[in-house]
Amino acid sequence: MKQHLNTLFVTLEGAYLRKDGATVEVRHDGESQLRVPLHNLDGIATFGWNTTVTTALMAACGDAGVSLSYHSPHGKFLASTTSGVSGNIVLRRSQYRASDEPVRALSISRNCIAAKIANSRNLLQRQLRDHPELGERPELVNAVAQLKNRLGHVRSVSGHDSLRGIEGEAAKLWFGALAKLNRNSDHALQMNGRSRRPPMDPVNALLSFVYVLLSHDCRSACESVGLDPQCGFFHKDRPGRHSLALDLMEEFRPVLADRLVLTLLNRGQVSRRDFETKENGAVILKPDSRKTVLTAWQERKRDEIVHPFLEEKTTIGLLPFIQARILARYLRGDLDAYPAMVWKS
């Protein structure tokens, strides 16, 4: 099992990252800001237009299996560096064959989307249980029933197009419910549907940013077990798209990303002052505010749960790596099906 380490997030504009012995040094304006032992990391993610990473550090990351990715200041994935194609060629060939076989690809996709819908429903039920006053809102109770209905349809779906339609319907139900679970009293921090590219309100800006963090971890997880993160089963192939990482993300979106955003809003850890609006109406997190979200994200990853399939205690941050390894076992023929991660309510 891959050791659960940490991801170093560098948000300083103009940061300079270099290898200093066995450590990663982050410098800014000619001064050292941070030194972290490379063996304590499993990933480095930079956010900014003028970040510099030395070739020596890139090589060291490649040798140590540390993922290195680059993002815009607002969280859009730009590129990543690797030491070359890694992993077992036999496993990757099995992955490519499964992706090209409609029945096997649909089986994996169905389980991922079923888990996503089940986790959305379980999270909604938990919110209703923990906050009884929400039970007086019939639209939330109805959303629970409707999500259960969509979950039943997933199990009998016969093609990817139908599955994508059901996933879209379930997502619309879920985001409608998520907006009503937001108990922040500031009207500026309310959500009016899901918007992206660009996000048009603070809640959507938060969601998009946290999804970038989750995507980084899922891509790293796929690479760590030797899978090709660009060859997916539910998401179609597209140049530059990490389709398998997006597939793996589906089962984690409600409980890792959406729940974190809801917690930040309901606890008042973010306010309207943490966001700015661009001329085109896009809403983004301010640089200093990203640190608040990153800290909450790392703390959330340290929480422990019992994995329902392995029946072993693990940290939440390790779950993408566990699921990637389980998927690899299925592709090798060690399992009859891929057991996606379903959270207990």
Image (cartoon, helix red, strand yellow):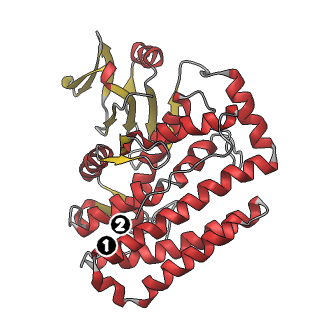
Label disc, if present, on residue 263 of the rendered structure: none
Where's the N terminus, which quadrant? top left
- Residue tagged by mark 2? 202
- Residue tagged by mark 1? 189
Q: Is residue 235 visible to us here?
A: no
Picture mark count: 2
Is 126 left, or right, of 84 in this rendering? left
**Residue at 31% in and 38% down:** 13
Query: What distance separates the C-alpha of mark 1 from that of mark 2?
Result: 6 Å
104 to 30, vertically: above or below = below
Nearer to me, 335 or 251: 335
Nearer to me, 336 or 255: 336
Q: Are marks 1 and 2 in contact (CB under 8 Å)?
A: yes
Q: Is residue 79 visible to us here?
A: yes
Q: Position of residue 238 (x, y in %)?
A: 69, 45
Nearer to me, 230 or 274: 230
Q: Position of residue 261 (x, y in %)?
A: 34, 61
224 to 48, vertically: above or below = above
